[in-house]
Amino acid sequence: MPRLNVLVEGPDDVRFFERVLVERLKNRYDAVRLVPYACLRRTAVDRLLRGFARLGEAYVIVADIDNEPSVRAKKRVILNRYEESQPGAIAVVIMEIESWYLAGADDGFLGQCGLLPLPSTNEVTKEGFNAIIPRPYLSRVGFMLDLLDGYSLERGAERNRSLAFFLARFAAIDK
């Protein structure tokens, strides 16, 4: 496939994909384009999805599970919101993108911050993440960027089931 269009919710997602996932996705796709969609109107997202289909380009809508009780329920929300979306092109992040940041973070770095590595980050919310940011950090973004230094996708996949699903479904190496 020539290009994968990754629709992400916001800047934290863009940062994570740029630093961690785009290169891995390029093992399968010739090009990867990140499209923040949370601030777009429904009709604009549907026009984008129609355009991707016309061009024969793949896409994936990445969405946090938020308050939905299951991945299936969140997919229904997305399918109802965007008429042009397809179930196989939706990846649900459990719980929120911050859980992916923590999942593959270097254990040594976490230790230096006074944090214990979590065996699973499936339950990490934005609020829980914000609560563990070490005091020396004046910026949430600074901490997030430091988490990505020495990041391991393999470790992340072991600690977060939605990241493992995303990698298996969209980043499998088949070139």
Image (cartoon, grey):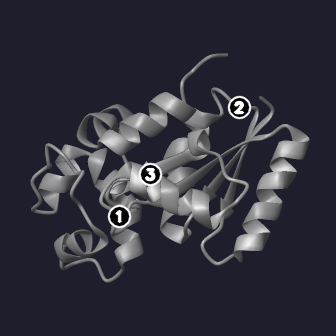
Above or below, comparing residue 147 to residue 22 in the picture: below
Q: Residue at position x 36%, y 80% from top?
A: 139
Residue beneath disc 1:
68
First in residue order: circle 3 vs circle 2: 2
Asked whether, in this view, residue 142 is left or right of residue 175, the answer is: left
Q: Quadrant of the N terminus?
A: top right
| Relative image position of residue 15 (x, y in whole percent) | 53, 61
| Relative image position of residue 172 (x, y in whole percent) | 54, 25
Residue beneath disc 3:
92
Q: Amino acid at mark 2?
A: Tyr
Closest to the camera, between mark 3 and mark 1, is 1
Above or below, comparing residue 7 to residue 140 in the picture: above
| Relative image position of residue 158 (x, y in whole percent) | 26, 34
Which image quadrant for residue 84? bottom right
Q: Amino acid at mark 1?
A: Glu
Asked whether, in this view, residue 121 is left or right of residue 26, the answer is: left
Q: Residue at position x 28%, y 77% from top?
A: 137
Residue 54, numbered circle:
none
Q: Residue at position x 81%, y 32% from top?
A: 2
First in residue order: circle 3 vs circle 1: 1
Closest to the camera, between mark 3 and mark 2, is 3
Residue beneath disc 2:
29
| Crowd band around label 3 with a 10 angstrom C-alpha radius: few (<14), some (14–19), many (20+) | many
| Relative image position of residue 41 (x, y in whole percent) | 71, 77
Marks 3 and 1, Cα distance to the nearest angstrom?
11 Å
Marks 2 and 1, Cα distance to the nearest angstrom?
31 Å
Which image quadrant for residue 64? bottom left
Q: Residue furthest top?
A: 175
Above or below, comparing residue 26 to residue 160 in the picture: above
Classify mark 3: helix, strand or loop: strand
First in residue order: circle 2 vs circle 1: 2
